Amino acid sequence: MITETISRCPWCGTDPLYVAYHDRQWGVPLHGDVPLFEMLTLEGAQAGLSWLTILRKRDGYRQAFAGFDIQKVAEFNDADTARLLADSGIVRNRLKVASTITNARAVIDIQARHGSLDSYLWSFVNGVPIRNHWQTMAEIPARTPLSDAMSKDLKRCGFRFVGSTICYAFMQATGMVNDHLTGCHCYNAPLPSAKIPPANPQHML
């Protein structure tokens, strides 16, 4: 009997949840304000922790933060904060919890000024995924000039837990950049070619 061997990026290991995330989600272009807000939240929550820890808490986050309904999260109050800090389904870090609420309010401002969070974030790559050509994990950067620019502008807009390293991980996760290794079976997976024009490419307006 011949066992088929599938080549993957080594970071996902063999955990079924992690492997499924690698194969089906990481690097796949993600759109929609709610999904993007969710991923930005999860990437910020991951700071100092493993991504597998966050994946295991993903359902808990969705329940705790009203399915990442941006308007509802933006209206969370002190009682909600207390509830969240007692919820073992999420990372119970006061600063991270507070940042999610703050960031939801910042998203509403982004939507008012740029049309949508989607168009604003994707404008950093001109609406087109960047395909890199890394052969080894050692080649993949932790941050880039683009993630530096995204981080700087998000901070200017009032977002928290959006350092450049977090932003680059977010860009990788949402398919703004394809950082699957060239030997990974996901590397040549078809990506949409349609350009998604930003609602307002002038971030400083």
Image (cartoon, helix red, strand yellow):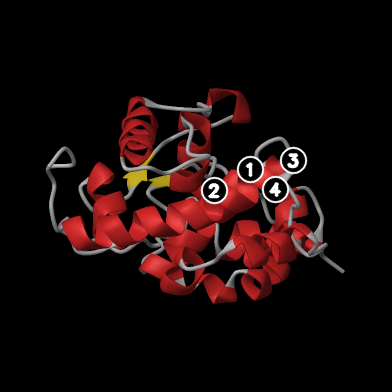
Front residue of this view, candidates 167 and 162: 162
Image mark for residue 49: 3
Residue appearing at x 69%, y 46% in the figure: 94
Question: The residue under label 4 is which amino acid type?
Answer: Trp
Image mark for residue 51: 4
Q: Are marks 3 and 4 in contact (CB under 8 Å)?
A: yes
Question: The residue under label 3 is which amino acid type?
Answer: Leu
Q: Are marks 2 and 1 in contact (CB under 8 Å)?
A: yes
Estimate how packed mark 3 is, as few (under 14), some (14 to 19) or many (20 or more) residues with alpha carbons within 10 Å.
few
Tag in front: 3 or 4:
3
Mark yes or no: residue 184 visible: no
Tag in front: 2 or 4:
2
- In the displayed structure, does residue 95 sit left or right of residue 199? right
Name the quadrant containing residue 111.
bottom left
Name the quadrant containing residue 130.
top left
- In the displayed structure, does residue 70 sit left or right of residue 203? right
Which circle's residue, 2 or 3, is located before the other in the chain? Answer: 3
Where 162 falls versus 148 (above or below)? below
Image mark for residue 99: 2
Mark yes or no: residue 151 visible: yes
Residue 12 screen position, x and y as percent: 71, 48
Name the quadrant containing residue 33.
bottom left
Residue 9 screen position, x and y as percent: 64, 44
Q: Which residue is mark 1?
A: 95
Tag in front: 4 or 1:
1
Q: Are marks 2 and 3 in contact (CB under 8 Å)?
A: no
Name the secondary structure under disc 2: helix
